[in-house]
Amino acid sequence: MSTDPRSDADVPTPTRGIDPATARHLHHVLATEQRRGRLPSVAAGIVRDGDLAWSDAVGTLDGRAAGEAADTDTQYRMGSITKTFVAVAVMRLRDAGRLDLLDRFEDHVPGSALGGATIAQLLSHGAGVQAETNGAWWERTPGGDWDELAGPGAGSPVEQRFRAGRRFHYTNVGFAALGELVARAHGTDWFDVVRRDLLEPLGMSRTTTRPTGRAAHGLAVHPFADVLLTEPEHDAGAMAPAGQLWTTVQDLSRWAAFAGGETGDVLSGDTLAEMYEPHTVVDNPGQAWTTSHGLGWQVWNVDGTRYAGHGGSMPGFLAGLRVDVESGDGVVVLANSTSGMGQVATDLLAAFVEREPRTPEPWHAAGDPTALDLVGTWHWGPSVSTARLVGEHLVLGEPGQARGSRFAPTGPDEWVGLDGYYTGEPLRVVRATDGSPSHLDLASFRFTRTAYDPAADVPGGVDEGGWR
């Protein structure tokens, strides 16, 4: 018997004209996960091109068959997805010139034991800061202020478990610290900053620090019986920036669109891309390196596809957000259970992409004919590379293979690398007296039209005896 009190006819219709068969399949995936994981309720949404393409919910707010059905305007705690909002608030301060990522935490919030860690290290969980508080389980007990948590007056000072910069060590306390930094920089509560600078511009009116309006009950499901226990709900105080926020599928889908590149006037695309650059690798013995942390975001590399997002859990709630960095397609999932939810976010996104593939953009001529004399074969020593013009980029070799890279123009005969080994490195075209390209000077390497061309100023010279 279904745990969803609605009939199949009540299943929400897709919001952007996806195939009804796709919507039915996604509903089946979500309903199957709700029953498999014994989740009182679970709600989800798929984002494409900045909009909510599909959304649905299964189960009830209190986990009872006769309870009120969950929907996409039901609030759930998002847990650690809160950290991504704090991180964006920090990066806005950086972009405004009010801090540097290499600043020590002490420079902005003096007096704590975290002072030597840099802001970048705190954002990427590379500061070595202890994972949890020294007091009672903060996720289930009301919290105090910053001084009680980690300030000079704290009875049991917060510590660093590892040398800053040594390794990944997930830390909720570190994001409490970043929330305090944001608050002090603006002279107001951290959430006031998030609401004013992020939520209101993005139209996220249902994202709050405490439940408001229609909200799911935080529940634990007994491991060996189909009975429920209500989890506590409270203000976490100084620890709130680590996981306090409540949201809905509709609101969190707007944040997924943001993560997929629809940042509006809130953050530049370049800064968002910077936040996705891996800083610390999650190193689990016996497992491949697929997960890392950038500046406030989790980053996954799955068979060459890059995803960004974050997971979240608090007593009574589970959450997930993941976007394909290249396409912007994303998924959000929220459930009111302390445990039990599997990889349904990944499954939903994969099913959607398989059934609703993107149509490739039409090809159009857009190259620069003035750079045609750069295409063709080049040699670095005896190695052979082919240069092509793809749109505005000069492509030398195959990006992702060896030292292949794309280059963007920065001036007449000046380019800069965009990929791999040559990222950020300059490429200069050196021309002969007749104006033809003599060689490419790439980060001190010479690329010549023929191998070891003696007329192309090869560093170290070319043996006068030539090839023999």
Image (tube, helix red, strand yellow):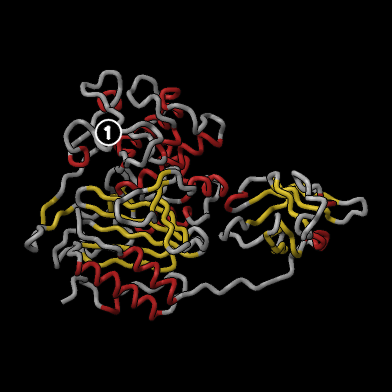
* Residue 329 coordinates in the image, percent (x, y): 47, 63
Q: From this viewpoint, is residue 51 visible?
A: no
Q: Is the residue 125 above or below the residue 111 in the image?
A: below
Outermost bottom residue? 21
Say which quadrant the N terminus sits in.
bottom left
> Which element type, helix, strand or loop, lies under badge 1?
helix
Look at the image and tell me whether residue 194 can be seen. yes
Residue found at the very far right of the displayed protein: 434
User: On the image, which quarter does residue 215 sit in?
Assistant: bottom left
State whether residue 279 is above or below residue 391.
above
Q: Amino acid at mark 1?
A: Gly
What's the residue at 68%, 54% (across, down)?
Answer: 407
- Picture quadrant where residue 308 is located: bottom left
Residue topped by disc 1: 237
**What residue do we see at 68% from left, 48% from top?**
416
Q: Residue at x 51, y 48 (%)?
A: 272
